[in-house]
Amino acid sequence: MAGTLYVVATPLGNLEDLSRRAERALAEVDVVAAEDTRRGRELLNWLGIKKPLVSYYEPREEEAIPGIIKRLLAGENVALITDGGTPAVSDPGYRLARAALEAGVRVTPVPGPSAFAAALSAAGLPTDRVTFAGFLPPKQKARREALAELADRRDTLVFYESPRRTVEFLRDAAGVLGDREAAVFRELTKLHEELLRGSLLEIASELDSRPEVKGEVTVLIQGAGEKAEVSEEEARKMLAAALAAGRPLKEAAAEIARLSGLPRKEIYAWGLEIKSRASSD
């Protein structure tokens, strides 16, 4: 009889967030598949559990899957864990779960910590409709294109981002989506947990004033409203943010015209004024 694949959520940072069910699952399985075996071993040691670990991380998922499926079909129970949070949510896992299901293996979630859900619960933004976009492409052009695809969604938008790219991401988002209300969580559940609220550009300015941004970052952005009136002042701010982020004027003017309903030629002329002032400074 085949074993069971347990998809086990583990703490983001505070070990006290581990559920009793997750602890029991880790204690009872035959083997633990971990995104990082060193961090997996640290967690098991903290729990006083001794289990063999196998490596399962994203660049080599396809290589690891056959061996894990073989164990499951031989009757072993396997727990899948990542470095923190819920496996397969912007972390390795869905390919293994799919392969197990296709092989006729039972897959059971052991729910628990998730940066996405934790941030959403405390951000003060609407939670009835949500789009989770995870990590957007690191390259600016591709990132802007991905943001543009989300521009008309009325859902609260949730992203994960590298601390090194957070300021750039926020400015790109303001340039593409408009300077919307947002919340940025840093180091969720850890000693230095921080929540920043305000507009995208306000938060970007605050983080840019620091020597560096540290820790894992979750960004939540208010969804698009009704086809709302966008004042000239707001449109000018959007344009300035887009140009400051390096977006081509023609592209930025077209996008802001679409969002605001203002004439594209007029917005383009503002952009020329901004560029002229910048070159004379």
Image: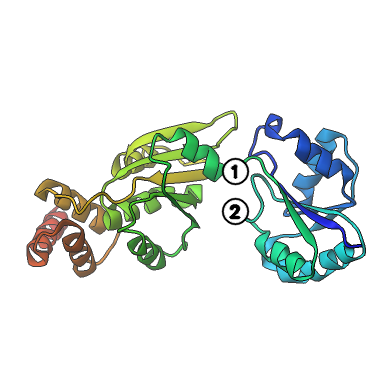
Q: Give the residue type that dot 2 points to.
A: Val
Judging by the rendered image, the residue that carries numbered circle 2 is 89
Alpha-carbon distance for marks 1 and 2? 8 Å
Instruction: Please state the horizontal and vertical placement of residue 263, each as a whole percent of the image.
Output: 8, 63
Instruction: Please state the horizontal and vertical placement of residue 60, each as a whole percent of the image.
Output: 72, 67
For residue 192, what is the image quadrant?
A: top right
Asked whether residue 243 is in view, the answer is: yes
For residue 73, what is the image quadrant?
A: bottom right
- Which residue is found at the position 40% from the left and 39% from the top? 183
Determine whether, in the image, residue 51 is placed left or right of residue 169. right
Determine whether, in the image, residue 141 is placed left or right of residue 232. right
Number of numbered tags placed on the structure image:
2
Judging by the rendered image, the residue that carries numbered circle 1 is 114
CB-based contact (under 8 Å), mark 1 and mark 2: yes
Instruction: Please state the horizontal and vertical placement of residue 207, each as a whole percent of the image.
Output: 39, 40
- Which residue is found at the position 83% from the left and 38% from the top? 24
